[in-house]
Image: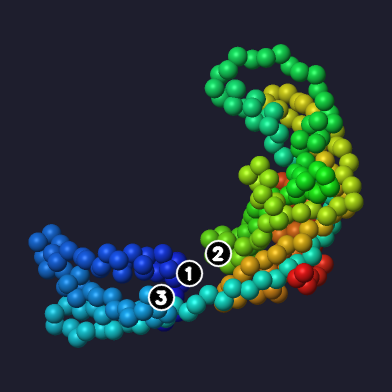
Amino acid sequence: MALSSSLLAWFNFGYSTVLKKGFNMPKTINGKSNGVAEAAKIVASKPAPSVITVKTTPAAAEPTKEVTLEIPAMKLELVRLRVVGESPLIMHQWSEKAKAQMRDKQQKAAKVGREVRNPQAEFDAATYFISQNPVRYGFPVTAFKSSMVDAALAAGGKKTETRRAFHIQYDAVVNGNMLVEIHAPHRIMREDMVSVGMGTDLRYRPEFPTWEVHLTFQYDARQTSPAQLIALCNQSGFSTGVGEWRPEKDGLYGRFVVAGIMEFD
């Protein structure tokens, strides 16, 4: 009998607990005999079985029924895709200064006078760096996975099943952010007017006119394939995108397309 993804996840999580604690159910419910509970028994001869046999007796007058649940082992594989930007990428990392201002406001701390703006410092603070010497840019890997999950939902898929089907590996962790490297020849400073509350303000953010990223996917070959991942990545790059002013947010930036499959080093 084929398992749904939710039932399969339940067995993967709960099986070890059942073996350790036993499968004890009440013999009576509201004073009445619970025939199913009395007869339920999980039979297992190995620590990590692929088949679980469940014997149940629904009622005393009915014969014993045996149901076999087959849980095949996962088939994990890797594929690396070269993803190329089709429109400029705009980054906007929250700076430590902005986080401190938010904390002070929430904690009702005393206000300080407004400091003189430093566009270059704000520009650098809005950039995700893997390292600054040598310069290596990054971007949150979760942005690409979220983009693909949203694209699957728009195409009629389910978020939970899509999330479970694959993971994207990160290249570095910086300040708690899991980053994939952005390969780009240079960045430029943007000066944008943005709405803040009832007013407007200026923001200094990096834009990457040309960029690409190499995404390594780990996936369960029983649920998806490289061809499906490529199709989903292309769909997300067209309809959702990543970064500021992406298609999902009524913009045109941060679009991308799969340029090919890469060999592993």
Q: Find residue 89 and report its horizontal and vertical position in percent.
A: 81, 48
Q: Which residue extends farthest left?
A: 31
Q: Is residue 187 left or right of residue 127?
A: right
Work out whether 67 lies above or below 155.
below
Residue at image point 82% right, 67% down = 259
The secondary structure type at the circle numbered 2 is helix
Q: Amino acid at mark 1?
A: Ser
| Relative depth, front residue between 160 and 76 | 76
Residue at image point 69% right, 52% down = 172
The mark closer to the camera, 3 or 1, is 3
Q: Which residue extends farthest front?
A: 133
The mark closer to the camera, 3 or 2, is 3
Q: According to the image, label 1 marks what residue?
A: 5
Residue at image point 36% right, 79% down = 46
| Relative depth, front residue between 253 and 41 | 41
Rendered image quadrant of residue 203: top right
Mark 3 vs 1, N-terminal side: 1
Q: Dot 3 surroundings within 10 Å: few (below 14), some, or many (20 or more)?
A: few
Q: According to the image, label 3 marks what residue?
A: 48
The secondary structure type at the circle numbered 1 is helix
Residue at image point 18% right, 83% down = 62
* Marks 3/2: CA–CA distance: 21 Å
Q: Are marks 3 and 2 in contact (CB under 8 Å)?
A: no
Q: Are marks 2 and 1 in contact (CB under 8 Å)?
A: yes
Q: According to the image, label 2 marks what residue?
A: 164
Q: Find residue 50 and report its horizontal and vertical position in percent.
A: 42, 80
